[in-house]
Image: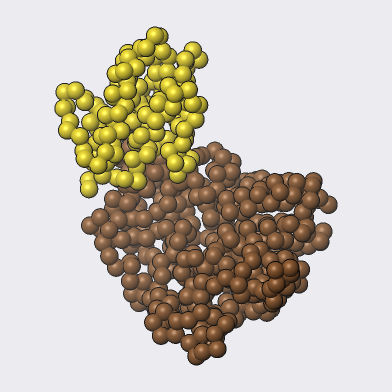
Amino acid sequence: MDLSDLYQEIILDHNKHPRNAHDMSDATHSAEGYNPLCGDEIKVYLKLEGDRVVDISFKGEGCAISKASASLMTERLKGKTLAELGKESAFVLDLLSAEEEPELDLGEVGDLAALSGVRQFPARIKCATLAWHAVDAALAGEDKISTE
Amino acid sequence: MSWDIDSIRRDFPVLSQTVRGKPLVYFDSAASAQKPRQVVEAVDAYYTTYYANIHRGVHELSMRATDAYEAARKRIAKAIHAADPREVIFVRGATEAINLVASSWGRGHLSKGDEILISMMEHHANIVSWQLIAEQTGAVVKAIPMGEEGVLDMDAFDRLLSDRTKILAIGHISNALGTVHPVRAMVDKAHARGIPVLVDGAQAVPHMPINVQELGCDFYVFSGHKVFGPTGVGVLYGRGEVLESMPPYQGGGEMIRSVSIEKTTFRDIPERFEAGTPHIAGAIGLAASFDYLEGLGWDNIHAWEASLLAYATERMEEIPSVRIMGPKDNKASVISFVMEDVHPHDIATVLDAEGIAIRGGHHCAQPLMRALGVSSTARVSLAPYNTKEEVDTLIKTLQKIHTMFAE
């Protein structure tokens, strides 16, 4: 178990300089993710045109893992179709918590690979999945989800 | 002072291990304290040499178990200076004790428009229990706000005490910040208006000798596991005449005088509030933990904890990104802090990787966290078995965190 697997440079960078970290007045979908363990809240916003995510952002309090995961997520999902988003989301949830660690094609996975270190820290997996669950909730028309 | 730290640490076998390849540094005693082998041995002796149920068998083991259980009640009554052992009720912990009072006392005394006075700084156990009974009775929960950071606003307290106030329920020491509240003065003010007082002593009992008669409170509650005793056992102290006036909390065996399908009569205190087979081993273990603490000596414990607290505070203040929350003085050996640009959970994870156990989170005190303007803090709590060398290890790692999360 190595701390530098968890706090990789990409994670620390996204924590310090989160991308797309703002609210969105013309969002078509939004939901709040709440982690009752720590009281952290992250709200995600999506703007859909047809089935394409033309804009996505997040706002809220969180640890480095949840903030970086949300930030990486917004970069990853902007411009994707809903079908692509579903695949990305399923892949990340697998990457974080599937019993068998999925094979990583680094060319395809890109910066998201930085999240794979979280697997070794079970207490922190919910931090990393929070924003992704919130996006799923927003698209399902729910306004709030809890990691509980 | 006579204080042999090596020998004390040997009393806690759990401490002599490595965690993640590093010597364990246990700074989470405010969440739950480690157990000295004297406590473990007392529990073990009950299970291995005289185990039986209490208060019913006529056989030898049952009588020995009953004697040990009642001796534990007496031992704890003596430790907290209760006037009568019957005022000591064994419960599962502080949480159950507060729920017992809220439910049993509350049903008989609260009605629409009555006020239950708590504070913004309470543990959720001393908030939610009252909200539940308020909902059932139409009473309202009011909270004393914070004045200075981490200190109750005593002017507001004076204003909030009114003819509508039916009970004051207040922590003795804040679990999140370590603040020692002026409980004695608050009891006097409440009593001057005929208002009974419950004191949540979960965080106080491990740090100081308690004298419930001197405090004058009507109820005093605490958990065994925070005072180096077993989990699943705790104490509700209640003044005899108040307890006598309260209806049972739970029904069952042990608490009845006679039962028919039409009508049941109940036993006196303490049995009235101990339905079912109690945590006998827990009570015996908890008595042993008071033997242990008094053996160390409260003055010695206080001196050791105070010197560790002063040292840790001074060293932590050397780190520019660290901000310690709450009062500087008049506090227990608890340091709640935040670091600029580092979330408390990240602090706790990095410390964990170095074998250091602390609590990062809202400490079951979300209203307090909101009042402090944070969602959570990191909390280091210091116990008699901690050392300055352990504090040095903490400081080294906090410095590393500072560098790691800086740009």
**Residue, x 57% and y 82% (percent of image)?**
B56
Chain A colour is yellow
Q: How is the image coloured?
A: by chain
Query: Could you say which quadrant of the image residue A137 lies in?
Result: top left
Position of residue B72 relative to residue B198, above or below, is below
Farthest bottom residue in view: B60
**Residue, x 26% and y 38% (percent of image)?**
A98
Q: Nearer the viewer, residue A10 or A118?
A: A118
Position of residue B353 relative to residue B51, above or below, is above
Q: Is residue B268 visible?
A: yes
Q: Position of residue A14 (x, y in %)?
A: 32, 28
Position of residue A50 relative to residue B338, above or below, is above
Farthest top residue in view: A50
Q: Is residue B243 left or right of residue B126?
A: right
Q: Position of residue A39 (x, y in %)?
A: 48, 40
Q: Nearer the viewer, residue A13 or A130?
A: A130
**Residue, x 40% and y 26% (percent of image)?**
A136
Q: Position of residue B161 (x, y in %)?
A: 78, 51
Chain B colour is brown
Position of residue A73 relative to residue B392, above or below, is above
Q: How many marks?
A: 0
Q: Position of residue B397 (x, y in %)?
A: 31, 50
| Quadrant containing the C terminus of chain B in the rendered view | top left
Q: Is residue B207 visible?
A: no
**Residue, x 35% and y 22% (percent of image)?**
A74
| Quadrant containing the N terminus of chain B in the rendered view | bottom left
